[in-house]
Image (cartoon, rainbow, N blue to C red):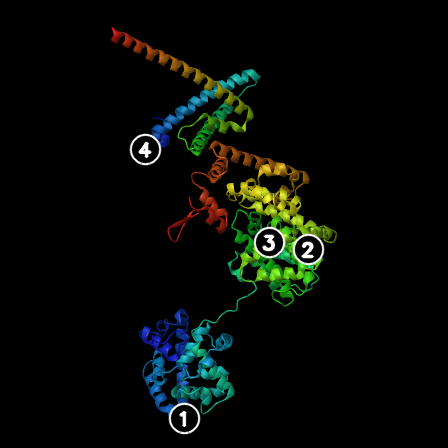
Amino acid sequence: MENDGKRSCLQPPHEVFWFLLQRLKAAVHYTVGCLCEEVASDKEVQLSRQTIAAISEVTFRQCESFAKDLEMFARHAKRSTINTEDVKLLARRSNSLLKYITEKSEEFNVERKTKKKKKLEDENKDSLEPAEAGGVGSEN
Amino acid sequence: MADGDISDNEPTTRTLLRRVLDTEAPRTPRRRQSTRAGVQRTPLGTPFSMRLRSQTKTTAGRQPHRARSIGRLAHIQTRGQLKEQTPRTLLENILLTAPESSMVMPESAVKPVPAPQVVQVVQFSRRESSPGSLELQLPELNAPTTLAPGRLTSGRRKKRLRLSEFQQGMDQELPLSQGPVTEPPGNTGASSLSSSLNLTFATPLLPQSVQRPGLARRPPTRRAVDVGIFLQDLQDTSVATAFPGDRTPVATLPTDTVLEDTQPFSQPLIGRSPSVHHSLPYPSLSAERTVSRRTRSSGPGLQNNSPGKPAQLLAGKAEEVDALAMRFPNTSSGTSGVDGLEPLLGGVGEEVEERMEESMSLSEVKEATGAQASARAEEPEAHTEVAEAEGSWGAIEEKELEGSSGDKDTEGRTARPELASSTPEFPRARQLEFLEPAPPTSTAVLSSEPLEPLSARLPTRLQTAGPRLRQDPYKMGLSHYAKLFSFYAKMPMEKKALEMVEKCLDKYFQRLCDDLDVFAAHAGRKTVRLEDLELLMRRQGLVTDRVSLHVLVEQHLPLEYRQLLIPCAFSGNTVFPAQ
C-alpha cells in the first residue's frame, strides 16, 4: 500500500483509520471543487488548484471543529444526541447563516409533523382495518 | 526524662543538664547536643568543644586557690582531663557538684520580665559567636569551671572571681550576691546569668507590632505601589519627613489603590474584592478596608510617633482621603472618602480617630462593620459636606474618580470578569449614589460568572461585562483597559488607536456576555454558571483537552480564589466548595 511508506510504524487500526480519513478528505475536496467551479462560473473568476485545495483543507478542519463544538453543546445541554438547537447555537455567529438554518429547521419540523400525522392516520387506518377484518371474521 | 516531675516552666540548670545527659548517649559533641535545646545546639557542638578545651586548660590553673572548690574542681578537672574534654563530661561534673534544688536566684528575681532576659540573652549572643541565644546558655552552663561568668562582665581580669563565685554559689545554694567575693557588675552578671539560665530555653518573645495585628496574614503585594502612595502622600501632606519604614507595612498590605499613571497596574486583588463585597466573604473586604485604614492612620501616626493616633489630624486626614479614595472602589471609597472628608470639614476627627483606633485594634470585622455602618449613617450628612468639600477638594476628587475608575478597572483586570462588570459604571457615577444599585445588580452577574483566568492574550485579560457597559453612557470603564493596552504595547499609541481598542473591547465583552447568556439558555437555565464559562473558554481555545480549567485557575489566580473554585477536601471529610 502506498501508505506504508508514511505510516509503517502504525498499528493496523491506525492505518485503516488514516486511510479512511484520506478518503473522506478526498471526497470533501471533490465537493469543494465542484462548488468552487460553480462560484467561479457565477462570478466569472478563476480559481487555481491550490486555492481549491486550501479551501477544502480549511473546510475539513472546520468541520472537525464544528463536530467537537456540537458535541460540547449537546453535552452542555445534558443530551447525548446532537440537536438542531446545537447546530443553531453553532451558527449564531453569522446572522445570515443563522437565518438560513432556522428557516430550514422550521421547514423540517413542518415536514416531520405532516409525516407524523400521515403516519398516525395510516396506522389508525391500518389498525382499524385489521380490527374490522378481525371483527368481521370473528363475527362470521 | 529523669526530671519529669519538674515542669518545663522552671528549667533549672540541673534538670536541663540531666535531660541532656539522659537523652543523648555519649557521643561526639555535635551529636550530643540535640536534645532539649533542639537543633540549635548542634552547630554549637564543635566550636563549643573547642572552646571548652581551651577554657578548661586555662581554668585548671586557677582553681587551686579556692579551698572549697578545690576538691570538687580537682575532681572535675581530673575527671575532665582524664576523659575527653566534652560537654557531656562537663555536664556530668556539674551535676555531681551542683545542688539538687533550683537555681540560686529567687523566683521573683528570675521571673520578672522577659525583656531584660532578652537583653541579657542578646548580650550573651553578642559576646559569643554562636548564632542563637538559646545556644549561648549552654556553653555558659557547661563551663562553669571556665570563664562563663567572666564573659558577662567582658573583662578578662575578672574571670577568676566570677568562676569561683559561681562555683561557690552553685555549691552552696546561696544567692550569688552572698558570695565571698561579690561585685555589683559581677553580681548582676552572675544573677543575670542565673536568671538567664533559668530562662535559658524559653523563647525570647519578639515584640510584635500591636498596631497591625492582621498584617502577618495579609498576602504580600508588590512594593511598586508603595512609591505611588508615598509620592501621593508627599504631595498632599505638609509633613516633610516621610518615613520609609512606614511604607513598608503598607507594602505588605494588599495595596492596590494607587492608579495614577505611574502605577496603573497595581494588583487589584483586594481592591476588587470590596466591589464584590456582597458576594465575596465579607470579612475579607472589611478586613482589607480596616487594614488600609490602619495603614493610613498608622502612617501619619508613625510619623508623629504616636501609634494609633495621628497627631497631625489634618495631614493625616488629607492622606487618608486621598489614600482611601484611591485605594478603595466606590463602595468603600464613598464611605471612606466621606469619612475622610467629614473630619476635615466638620471637625469630627475624633470619631474618625476612634474608628481608626478601632480598626487598629483586634477584631477586624467588627470594626469594619461598625465603621461601615457609621460611615453609611453619616453619608447623608457627608453628602452635603462632600458638596461643600468639592470646591476645596476638587483636585482630590478628580483623583479619586480617576483613581477609583482605574481602581475599578484594575479590579476587573485580573481574572474576574464579573467584577469588572461593575467597573465601567463606578468611576463615572456619583459614588454614593451608585453604591446601592450597582453592587446588587453586579452581584447577580458576579455570582454567576465565576472566573476567567488570566492568559497571555490581551483580550482575555481585559474582560468586563458587555451589557453593563451598554447601559452606561460613558465608556470610562474601558479607558483603563486601553491604558493597559498601551502599556503592554510598549510603544506610544495614538488616541484614535486607543479609541478603536476601546471599541473592540466593548464589542468583545458584549459578545462574551451574550455567549454566556446563550449558553445558559441552551442548557435551559437562567443563571450563568461555571459550566457555561467553561464552555466559552473551550470555544476560545483556552481550555483544551490538555489544559483544563483547573489548571488555568491554578496558573493565573491567587490562592484565595483558587480555594473557592477548586474543590478541596478538608478535615472532617468535608469538601469545599461543595459540588
Chain assignment, label 2: B
Identify whether B479 is placed above or below B185.
Answer: above
Which residue is at 64% across, 46% downward?
B405
Identify whether B27 is placed above or below B186.
Answer: above
Please say whether residue B217 is visible from this viewpoint.
Answer: yes
Can you give x and y, in whole percent of width and height, for residue B510 in the image? 58, 35
Q: CA distance from mark 2 to mark 4?
A: 77 Å
Is B144 on the left-hand or right-hand side of B405?
left
**Residue linked to disc 2:** B341
Mark identifier at residue B373: 3
Q: Residue furthest right?
A: B391
Q: Amino acid at mark 2?
A: Leu
Q: Secondary structure at mark 4?
A: loop
Can you give x and y, in whole percent of width and height, for residue B131 in the image? 46, 72
Q: Are marks 3 and 4 in contact (CB under 8 Å)?
A: no
Please say whether residue B221 is visible from this viewpoint.
Answer: no
Q: CA distance from mark 2 to mark 1?
A: 79 Å
Front position in the image: B317 or B11: B317
